Amino acid sequence: MRAIEPVRDGDTTRGGVRLHWEVYGEGDRTVFLMPTWSIIHSRHWKQQIPYLASRCRVLVMDGRGNGRSDRPLEPEAYSDEEFVADALAVMDDCGIGSAALVCLSAGARWGLMIAARHPERVTRLAFIGPGVRLEPWQPLRDAVNATFDDVRDEYDSWQKFNANYWLQDHRGFLETFFSSMFPEPHSTKPIEDAVNWGLETTPQVLIATERAAGLDRAESERLARAITCPVLVIHGDEDEIVLHANGLALAELTGGRLLTMEGSGHGPHLRDPVAVNLALGEFLLSPPSRPAVRRALKRPRRALYVSSPIGLGHARRDVAIADELRKQVPGLEIEWLAQDPVTRVLAAHGEKIHPNSKNLALESRHIEMESGPHRLHVFEAWRRMDEILLHNFMVFLEAVRERDYDLWIGDEAWEVDYYLHENPELKQAAYAWLTDFVGWLPMPNLGERDAFLVADYNAEMIEHIERFPRLRDRAIFIGRPEDIVPGTFGPGLPEIRDWTEHHYQFSGGYILGLESEELGDRGDLRRRLGYEDDEVVCIASVGGSGVGTALLEKVMGAYPAVKRRIPTLRMIAVAGPRIDPAALPKIDGVEVRAFVADLNLHLAACDVALTQGGLSTTMELVAARRPFIYFPLIDHCEQNFHVKHRLERYRAGRCMDFEAASPDRLAMEIESLLSGPVDFLALETGTAARAASMIAEVL
């Protein structure tokens, strides 16, 4: 799922070649994110488009040879002159007279040509790792080109930049090239993305691009000296594709400014997108001005609370923490940066939602799109949410720069935590991080690749925390040390529990929206909610995301079999905020409800519950001492390991395999649960106040 969608898209045909383009955002000013070498298409700008489009119009196009543009095979079709003419034709088709150009690698040549020859069309010019043939880079290019057609028995390293090897092993070349493009540690995702984009074209196209005519060194220098608009050159000093000295030379020739990305490679816009976005925003667009500045001692104490949108349980526990925090810090103002469905819970509690919340990309929608019938590879879904997470971090950053906050609180606000550790200089308030699980875990059935990626992500997280231990002023684990799963973060990495105990404080137990004693008499609660004393109430709930359709269909389909065993059964299926009740099957006797704001009360009042393996819902059932069956989503490491481990500690719930849950089996299990005792361990109380006390200390 993309963070934002284009407001307009179309095709321009020039010389018989169809060129696809997209326009994002609106405004008088335009930023044109130029195409680059045909080895990738315009999706490589995915981390810049949403940020820039929030402030101006953004034009992107797939260069000829990849994406949704045509792929001619003649070398002359890929000359620098053709790419320049393509860009101008697309600008004309879109009614764009002038624009600021942003160019990566080979695209720098085309931006240079347009700005020098058509200065009226270019307002500003930004280069990233510019592949312009200048003195520092030309000898390396000449050496590579000299062996481009050589036939070898084996190809190693840059010998793979070879026409014969490309035809022999296209993927092998892409993996080698993009590993060089992203030399930074823990770059598996941008490498993987770029390889997949490269597979959308062919080696024949790439060979044609290499045989095409292009600017020589003398013409490149002449054009660079002719540039009159402001210029910014962004270049990583560990760039293995285009030498950093080349960017320095271009900055000097154009009279531009050089921004060196220390420790970065050839693709900092993908690997270090926050720093690149901020640099581009400052250079291309005037920064937004603050409406007012208040003297420090006149400022109220204010916190910005970022609550995870994946599920509703986070929202209820966060409201409980916020209520306790206000008691302990009188006068504290709390604003919420949140999205649907969390905002529904917050609105029901009268909380103040930050206006920038409307700009957040829907993480819940992405999770739904990544899921299958009762299946969610949650780790991979999270990896593939990188574009959305970056966009939402930039929204957060804009919010905290617009006004003053004493405290930022993130309850599993992964984007805030990750990008603050990647850019620690951006921290300007106390920061508290909360989570109820630590460490991704591989699913045994998904093989070595999954295990490798999980360990790599865990290793990066550990490195972040060890390098910047004071970035989190408070790191709070919602639970107890014994709730942490056994085992290590991966080969050669620490034990999860031992490491967590050294880096977290503990709330002492799970945090609920309501403590169990606040629920009152269960009989009174049942009557208030409309449940009769002589009926067996079964609640089927799948949380706040839209992933639970298959489970609701299964348990609803089992209703007749359960009813035969339990004649007084009353089944209520709660679709939640993200599932359309009309999409569920109509089963006589089964009541279907949409979003239920006080679902925790209904769970406390029921006789038995059927639910996914989410922690919040199951812990609400533990607190209410209600028997329940839970069905962990297939390939969901948190539900299959972290949640299951915690529930086993409380001796609570009955775990059931989704595939094995036939109607008769489900009916038998429900009957068995109802006939047996509930001997759960008691859930700890006072945990919201304890967490709030830890947070209040930093104020």
Image: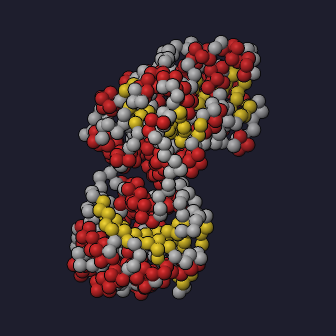
Quarter of the picture containing the N terminus is: bottom right
Q: Residue at x 67, y 36 (%)?
A: 595
Nearer the observer, 286 or 695: 286
Q: Residue at x 55, y 14 (%)?
A: 678
In which quarter of the view is residue 506 placed?
A: top left
Q: Residue at x 30, y 29 (%)?
A: 502
Residue 499: x, y in percent? 30, 32
Q: Is residue 28 above or below residue 524?
A: below
Residue 316: x, y in percent? 57, 30
Picture mark count: 0
Q: For this view, does 432 lie left or right of residue 351? A: left
Q: Residue at x 56, y 75 (%)?
A: 96
In which quarter of the view is residue 282 placed?
A: bottom left
Q: For this view, does 614 lie left or right of residue 456? A: right
Q: For this view, does 157 lie left or right of residue 542? A: left
Q: Is residue 518 above or below residue 282?
A: above
| Residue placed furthest toward the right | 588
Residue 92: x, y in percent? 56, 80
